[in-house]
Amino acid sequence: MVNLEWYRTFKEVYENGTLTKAANALYSSQPGVSVHLNALEAYIGKKLFERTSRKMIPTEEGKFLYEYIIGSIEKLEKAEQHFRRTSKERKPSLHIGMCSEMFQLILEPKVPQLEFDLIAKFGSHIDLIKDLSNGLLDLVITPKTPDTKNQQVTYTPFSKERIILIAGNNVETTEIEELIKTKKWKALEEVLQEKTWYSASNEMEHFRRFWFENLGKKPAFKPNYILPNITSIIRCLYHAEGVALVPDFLCKEAIAEGKIKLVWEGKVSTDNTLYFASRSDIKSKEELKYVEEIFQDKFEEINQINF
């Protein structure tokens, strides 16, 4: 089904003559306008504009479509102006992407205090970076290795996450701790395999990487429980006799409060650098900076927690 925003974007490109002017009128980005226009052309199956270096020149199909929809679009815009409850001046808007756990821990408590509109999206880091490059997102929080070939996206490191082994308080870990202390890695592997394991579908890469870097091989088993996210894993371990490999920033507070326990940080530090990935052409720079400061302050607070 066609997205009505595509028609609004088409109207602004038609009336303004360039993608840049249309983006300014829509409080959007030029890549975002291009995505909408390309999607509409693909849906219709006709070329709506001839692209030149200076101007977007409507084709005959474009002229016909404009005359056909302009009355309806203007009626919708009048209805929007009449019924909206917000002030006449449009609030800035920020589109961001990250994992759901990070949003819940860091940004969710701050949402009611924001003085701008926020649209948050969750998904794989690869998909989120792709949306960022296409102009659909303004900021992505990611541990993904920067793509230096992509000149549209700037990566700014702001903190690190370390993958650690945690367990529920009901799990007997004396044998594990002794094997780690005496560096009996083969025996440790065998004992760990016998435990009840929790993981999340989006964290299996961390699971395999920790195992390989610290025990020298790929894990020869799969977790018993694969849950939607890491927050669910941590909550389950409050009462379960299970273990899990998770990023430290998500569980430091729970460890400090005695709800779960730290078992092993690994003989090799399995770290990921966390980045702010953003585009230089976004309009809401002040809002982006404000969100980045929220993350920086929270990670600084978390990093002060000692195990």
Image: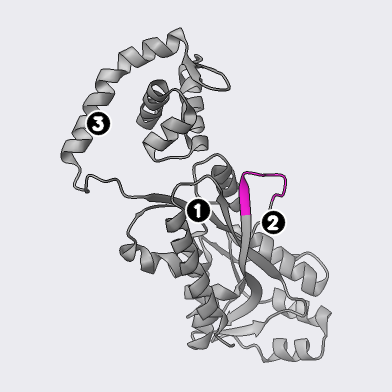
Which amino acid type is marked by label 2? Thr
Disc 1 and disc 2: Cα gap in Å? 16 Å
Which residue, given by chain and number where applicable, does mark 1 sit on? 97
**Relative vertical location of residue 93 with respect to residue 26 in this rendering, above or below:** below
Q: Residues within 10 Å of mark 3 (few under 14, many from 20)?
A: few
Magenta range: 147-154
- Compare marks 2 and 3 and give the one earlier in the sequence: 3
Image mark for residue 165: none
Residue for point 54% across, 86% down: 170
Give the side of residue 51 with respect to residue 210, left or right: left
- Compare marks 3 and 1 and give the one earlier in the sequence: 3
- Compare marks 1 and 2 and give the one earlier in the sequence: 1
Q: Quadrant of the C terminus?
A: bottom right
Residue for point 49% across, 14% down: 46
Magenta run includes residue 212: no
Magenta span dominant secondary structure = loop
Q: Residues within 10 Å of mark 1 (few under 14, many from 20)?
A: many
Image-quadrant location for residue 12: top left
Disc 2 or disc 3, which is closer to the eye? 3
Q: Quadrant of the N terminus?
A: top left
Give the side of residue 141 with respect to residue 64, left or right: right
Image mark for residue 145: 2
**Relative vertical location of residue 132 with respect to residue 11 in this rendering, above or below:** below
